Image (cartoon, rainbow, N blue to C red):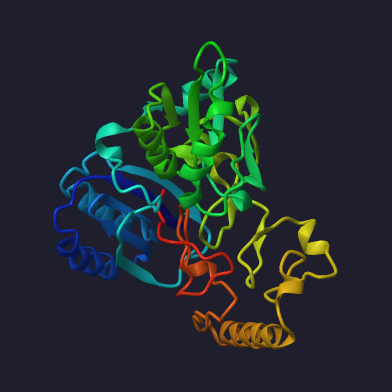
Amino acid sequence: MIKVAALYCFAPFKTPEDLRQPLLDLCAGEGIRGTLLLAHEGINGTLAGPAAGIDRAVAHIRALPGCARASVKYSRASDMPFHRLKVRMKREIVTMGEPDIDPAQNAGTYVKPADWNALIADPATIVIDTRNDYEVGIGTFSGAIDPETESFREFPKWFRKERERLLAGDVTPKVAMFCTGGIRCEKATAFLKSEGVEDVYHLEGGILKYLEDVRAEESLWQGECFVFDERVSVTHGLAEGTHSLCRACRMPLSVADMESPLYEDGISCARCHDTRTDAQRAGYRERERQVKLAKARGDAHVGAVLPGSADISDGFAEDEMEWDGHSARQGNDGPGA
């Protein structure tokens, strides 16, 4: 089994570029793959590899300035969920486009998974899913509001537009927010506080920690949780889920989706079939053929990332994804937890 660590920490790095090479050297030496993002606001990423190597990498990250309490969620994968190792410099470790907020100093109140059910069941609480529409589509908490965003960058505009409706009433409600591993909802609480909303909470460790800690029979989670690696989705206990991925548009596919006559493994699904040309589909088929040939030879084939297609192996564990510059939905920058 491969050990997977989804992690992030908002911390003030004065010269994040100085941290890149030591991290790259350590992870490469330990046989680790995945993606880390570094910015002045901190670190964010997902790594996978041998258990001892992952432990050493996490210890190194927690020794960085301000990262002693970095949020790390562990899980297992039956196969290596990434093809490459990347350590990249970014403007933000998860892109919101609001440069004046500081989650390291002004985030909302953490709520542990054991206390989350009581908070979101309170009629005085509104619950907001800060993830993107394709993630919400395969699972969310009962009663949560879906902003229907395609990118986390859209969240501030959505909130400002909906604020009056959301917070209407004689008593201002509590606002509880959640995301996959905690980074988006933590940044979202800092944004709401910068907008003058003080009574805001976020799920500590995100959905991943909730699914790990809360028993299925007590859970208020419905469906599966999308993750940005080859597992595609996870369920309670962080067991691998039932979803697959369309390689053409990178959208998660349920078992029912794969029964569509427009679905062709590695080539198309019902969502993207009519948006791709015959020439593109021919390119996808050749890519799939090469992948299968490499597998038959016992080679590791990372595959070309073709225009208009996606390679989940370069995905991130939290929000905006980059697929070597090509994506069906142009993301910005953030893996993480």
Q: Position of residue 145 (x, y in %)?
A: 61, 34
Residue 279 seen by the camera = yes
Depth check: 81 or 303 in front? Answer: 303
Lateral position of residue 117 relative to residue 254, left or right: left
Residue 240 seen by the camera = no
Outermost residue to the right: 261
Count of number-bearing discs: 0
Q: Position of residue 45 (x, y in %)?
A: 37, 56
Please determine whether, in this image, residue 166 is positioned above or below residue 268.
above
Q: Position of residue 76 (x, y in %)?
A: 48, 52
Residue at image position (61%, 85%) is 287
Residue at image position (56%, 86%) is 294
Q: Position of residue 39 (x, y in %)?
A: 26, 56
Question: Residue 121 occupies which quadrant of the picture?
Answer: top right
Residue at image position (51%, 18%) is 173
